[in-house]
Amino acid sequence: MIDSISVGIIAAFVAIGAIGFIAGFIKGTFKSITDLLFLGLNVLISVLVATYIAKNIATIENVTEYFPTIAPNLGLDQATIDQVNGYLTSPELNATAVSLLLALVSVIVLPIAFIGVFVAFGVVFIIPKIIVNKLIMPSTKGIGLRLGGGLIGALVKVAAVAILIMPIVGYVNYASETLDMLKNDDTQIEGLTQAEEIVDEVKDTPVFRAVHSVGGRALFDALTTITVDDVKISLRHETKTAIDIYKESGNFVGVPLDEYGDTQIESIERIEDIIQDADFVPAFISHALSFVAQEWNKGNAVFGLEKPVIGTELQAALDNTLIVLADTTPASFKDDLCTVAEIAKCAIDDGLLKAAVSEDGDILYVLENTDVISDILVELHRNERTRPILPAITDGAVNYLYSIYDEVNGTTTEKHHMIDISGLNEAVVRNEGKIISNVIIELDTFLESIEEHMDGATLDLIQYGDFASLGRAFNGIKQSYLFCDTFEFILRTVLESKGCAKLGILDEEFIQNAIRHDSDMEMMLVARQKVALLVLSMYKGEELDYDDAIEALLMNITTADADSVKSILTEENLKSIGVKGEHVHTISGLLTSMVDTIKDETTSIPDEDLAKEAESAVKIIPAVDSALDNSAKDKNVFVSSDDKETTSQMTASEFVSTTLESNLVSSMIVTATKDENGNEVDDPYNVREHLSENDLSELENALGEEYAEAEEGDEDKKEKLDAIAHIFGVDVSKFQ
């Protein structure tokens, strides 16, 4: 059938050419040239008039009237048709976006309008051609001019018919190219094969190929290309853009998020290239986004939708984003899309997306083993438009955590704002990402360590809490540009939490030391953990490693932190963590003296002696504290030859010699016997009334032996012996 049609069309063209030749032969060369000129003029005017008509046909009224008739053929249901029509007729719709959309419609109908206009002007130009031939063109004489007229006449008639069927040829070839692009897709479209066969048969006919190749395509492309608001809209190009995006969408739709990988990353890269090469899509979306953002920023509803409210914590991030989107242009939209695409690629490639959506996903593992946070921050920072959003995002994230804290603790936490990092260089921004990742990891480690002990014994919480990780998290926050201004706020907020409150570390001096002295937070928290652990373990009689506790205390306390650590040793604070009765006064005095001794720069404890000093302190401190259990004096504190039950495991001689051998313990006792002004403090550890007569006698003998062995001029040893005698109320004047 197609072959028969081809033969018929060719015969028709031959007949038309013959008719044109005869008419041209009769008219001659000059009058035939008139026909040729008017043909060219007709084409030019028809393009202009058809463009005007197409624009007037492609109005909101016409589109909304005929769209319901066309839409079902595109597979759209009635609800979608009604929604689209509602948007199109909305007075709120952005004018530029509408003009772009209508321009796209107009280029579709413009070739059809061209046919009607071309025929109409062909009729209209009959009289002007006659007038020109009569008044201007000379008569033709000679066979040569007759033959020339015949050839021109044949050309004019064939060209006129070719131009007339050009839109049909253009539509057929456009359909063929579109089907070629679609058929490369793995997804089968119903009816595609049959349509392709029909179109290919038509476009492969000689006449169609001829019209297409001798200018038909160029004229069709010209008719289906229009510029609106400096945006060039081409039917072929926009169709290719739409199909290319449609193809790439197949790599995302229906694929579980946790299965996104290299295929999706490659697809995102191709979409970036597609959008960068497009004109209509970026222009339309950018104007639509800009309009919606502007209206929402003014407090107006768009299509009946109010600006979203996403919670106080993240609202600022949305507001800042809308401010940025309000100034969206086609060029900036492309840049913004690339930023979003790069972030998406980072999230997929580094495994963050999979970890976030999978039931067994481990976000912490991703943060610990990739630079995903740094990569995302850098991408946001590279785009000047998205830089202002950074502080709002971090604000939202941090304040969201605070809102959880408030919900758990029944508090109302003041919201804080992060600083703007838009002025920082890329290297610093990348480092910010690493700090944030490390802080999250360390905080999670701490929270996991106390999770099982939150409602348990205080001692368990303090013993198993990984306060070193918490300290490292604080150190990271102090180093961060984003968080440094809120370090004190974050510090206070976290230290008020249940886990840290039981540690007894929330005091003003601790916080001020952490802020002013640039102290190592890991060291400070570990020191406090060890102090609390030591105090509670001694009082409760838990079998813990005292050596480790005291050694860690000695290694972690520095001059800058000593006063801060002492605040946990006040009698009031010791009561709050479980120490009761007379033990409060004694333990407070003992450990305060120890810290004061450590703080005293004249008391030097070499690193190699720390273990030995810790061992001595472990022996002496429990021995002194045990005296409080002998309130009725029915026992001895020190082991003696009278076989009486004792509260400690040391003899008086061992106590005195151990104290003298330990630089820390002896200095600690000397410190305890004097107040800040150098005046003697009576019974600093509150133990005198708990000593038996045998204890006093044993102590007096032990001290006497040490006094006797003291070398002449050894004032340091004598000072220490005097201090030991003073705290127990032993009169050793006869030995001095």
Image: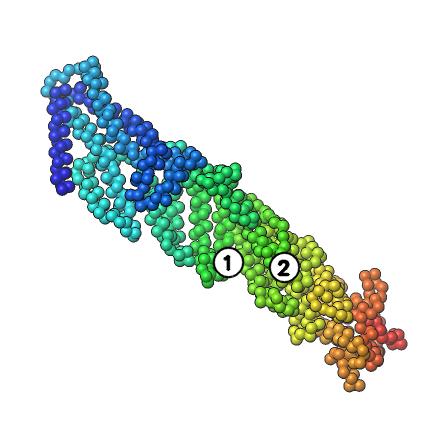
Mark 1 or 2, nearer chain start:
1
Work out whether residue 619 or residue 690 is closer to the camera in this orientation and state it.
Answer: 690
Q: Toward which corner of the image does residue 10 lie, by quadrant? A: top left
Q: Which mark is residue 158?
A: none
Residue 156, compared with residue 423, is above or below; it is above
Most distant residue in the top direction: 135
Residue 636 position, x and y percent, is 79, 80
Q: Is residue 69 visible?
A: yes
| Viewer-side label of 1, 2 | 2
Q: Quarter holding the N terminus? A: top left
Is residue 153 rendered to the left or right of residue 675? left
Q: Which residue is mark 2?
A: 497
Q: CA distance from mark 1 to mark 2?
A: 25 Å
Residue 2 position, x and y percent, is 15, 41
Work out whether residue 633 or residue 510 is closer to the camera in this orientation and state it.
Answer: 633
Residue at position x 64%, y 69% from top?
457
Mark 2 residue type:
Ser
Mark 1 residue type:
Leu
Q: Which residue is mark 1?
A: 367
Is residue 434 rendered to the left or right of residue 696? left
Q: Is residue 231 visible?
A: no
Residue 336 position, x and y percent, is 45, 44
Residue 502 position, x and y percent, is 66, 64
Work out whether residue 222 or residue 572 is closer to the camera in this orientation and state it.
Answer: 572
Callout 1 secondary element: helix
Most distant residue in the right direction: 734
Callout 2 secondary element: loop
